[in-house]
């Protein structure tokens, strides 16, 4: 699938997250479960998501072999607008802003490996240095969009300028 990469400037975002390790075969189910847990944490604290859910892929480096070996280190969550305190195992923190390479993957999550390979090659070809782990922003709700060929996932990889 051809992808278009663009460089954007991300704002600093306040986020509520949950970090965990998972086996690759369990990742989709673990991400869904963890996002549900973060959602419940927000509801318990009279808060609500202020944007799309995301995952941060702490196990990926620019030169990672894809898919990377297990275990995968993920952190999932939602942007939040309100000030609230984290409490174990949840964390509330500022996700750094700055220059970021981004592409949009349309289709099932199984195609994300190809999208990451494309983005890695694009970054390397352009001589870009990364400044943090990549993240997936889930732009489609699988419940509202049951046709997985229509799912939209934005991949963002922070870079140095």
Image: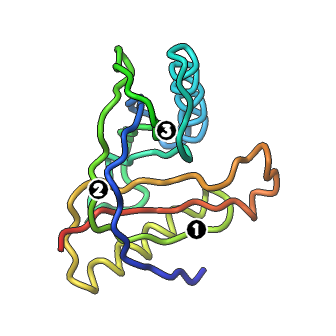
User: How crowded is the residue under tag 1: few (<14 C-alpha within 10 Å), some, or many (20+)?
Assistant: many
Tell me how the rendering is colored: rainbow
Measuring 37% from the left and 72% from the top, which residue is drawn there? Answer: 8
Find disc 2 in the rendering and name its residue: 97
Find disc 1 in the rendering and name its residue: 105
Q: Earlier in the sequence, mark 1 or mark 3?
A: 3
Q: Residue furthest front?
A: 82
Identify the image quadrant of the C terminus.
bottom left
Measuring 55% from the left and 36% from the top, which residue is drawn there? Answer: 49
Q: Earlier in the sequence, mark 2 or mark 1?
A: 2
Identify the image quadrant of the N terminus.
bottom right
Residue 104 horizontal/vertical position (percent): 55, 69
Callout 2: helix, strand or loop?
loop
User: How crowded is the residue under tag 2: few (<14 C-alpha within 10 Å), some, or many (20+)?
Assistant: few
Find disc 3 in the rendering and name its residue: 78
Seen from the viewer's position, the closer of residues 33 and 24 is: 33
Mark 2 and mark 3: Cα distance apart in space: 15 Å
Reply above or below: 14 against 86: below
Measuring 38% from the left and 27% from the top, which residue is drawn there? Answer: 83
Callout 1: helix, strand or loop?
strand
């Amino acid at each position: 699938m051809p992808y278009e990469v663009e460089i954007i400037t991300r704002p600093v975002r306040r986020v509520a997250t949950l970090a965990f390790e998972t086996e690759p075969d369990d990742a989709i189910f673990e991400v869904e479960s963890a996002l549900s847990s973060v959602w419940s944490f927000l509801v318990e604290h009279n808060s609500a998501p202020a944007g799309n859910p995301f995952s941060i892929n702490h196990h990926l480096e620019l030169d990672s072999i894809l898919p990377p070996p297990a275990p995968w280190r993920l952190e999932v969550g939602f942007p939040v607008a309100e000030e609230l305190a984290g409490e174990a195992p949840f964390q509330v923190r500022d996700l750094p802003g700055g220059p970021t390479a981004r592409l949009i993957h349309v289709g099932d999550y199984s195609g994300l490996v190809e999208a990451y390979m494309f983005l890695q090659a694009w970054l390397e070809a352009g001589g870009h240095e990364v400044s943090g782990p990549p993240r997936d922003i889930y732009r489609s709700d699988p419940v509202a969009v049951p046709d997985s060929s229509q799912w939209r996932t934005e991949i963002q990889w922070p870079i140095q300028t």
